[in-house]
Image (tube, rainbow, N blue to C red):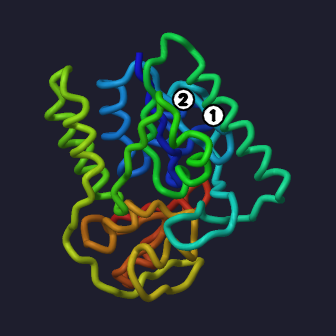
Amino acid sequence: MIAIIVTCRSKKHYFHNPTPAQEVYSAAYAFPPQRDFAKKVYDEHYIISTKYGLINFDTPIEYYDQVVFTRGKGHNKLKTKGVWSENEKLKWEKDLKENIKKLLSRKEIERVDLHLTTSYWNVIKKEFKKHPKIKFIPQQRNSPLVKTKYEEALRKYNGDNIEECLKIISTISGEEKEIEKTFYHPEDGEVYGKARDVWKKFPYVDLGGLHRVSMKRAKHHRGWVIDESLINQLKQQKGYKLYRINKT
């Protein structure tokens, strides 16, 4: 048996009651194709959550808006929204590593593939980079490319070519160039730059969702728009920073 571990997502569906994690995180642009690939290829499926630790795809969780960890530089950090105390951080790390070790200790588990961003991989890299059952699968920097890569890998998977598919996913590619612009938000004001600049300042956004807005593939993401005239059409919904555009 082989298992997969992926990361949680900042964009989530809001449900009134605890709901399987894979449904909550499916609101994120890149998660559904990654989930579909995981369920097609792997026997067991896990998510690293910044609130719940290591959980199964089907573990019921409540909606939360928490992207909390520690300070770092650029892409190699987990974004901060209310920095944890050192004790909280260490406990989260310890529990996560212990749960991964338990998974690896099971005789029927032949391999665990870590489909993680660099920020999450760096947290556990020291302990697991040389483990014979561990394989780290690098991720694309931009969520639209993550989505494209997993969709391509799923199409090409024939039941016996997992390594070929993993190469598709992990081979870093370029994409249509994003240009700097002004992003507008009814509560959080303006940010000039690219989607990543907004993401750095406001961790609640999903980078893939905001990138779609930046590339004019979506009108808004959690209230962020590039067409300032849409600000007056935004109506807030229940849940943290959730909006819809009123039809005119």
Q: Is residue 106 above or below residue 206?
A: above
What type is the residue that disc 2 sits on?
Pro
What type is the residue that disc 1 sits on?
Ile
Image position, residue 168 (x, y; %): 21, 45
Residue located at (47% from left, 28% from top): 133
Circle 1: is it few (<14), some (14-19), or many (20+) Cα within 10 Å?
some
Q: Can residue 248 be seen from the camera position used here?
A: no
Q: Is residue 117 above or below residue 106?
A: below
Quadrant housing residue 227: bottom left
Question: Which is nearer the N-term, disc 1 or disc 2?
Answer: 2
Image position, residue 89 (x, y; %): 76, 52
Mark carried by residue 20: 2
> What secondary structure is found at the residue carrying circle 1?
strand
In this figure, what is the number of numbered marks?
2
Separation of marks 1 and 2 at Cα, in angstroms: 6 Å
> What secondary structure is found at the residue carrying circle 2?
strand
Circle 2: is it few (<14), some (14-19), or many (20+) Cα within 10 Å?
some
Q: Which residue is mark 1?
A: 61
Q: The C terminus appears in which quarter of the rendering? A: bottom left
Residue located at (22% from left, 37% from top): 165
Q: Viewer-proximal residue, 152 or 117?
A: 117
Residue located at (42% from left, 65% from top): 221
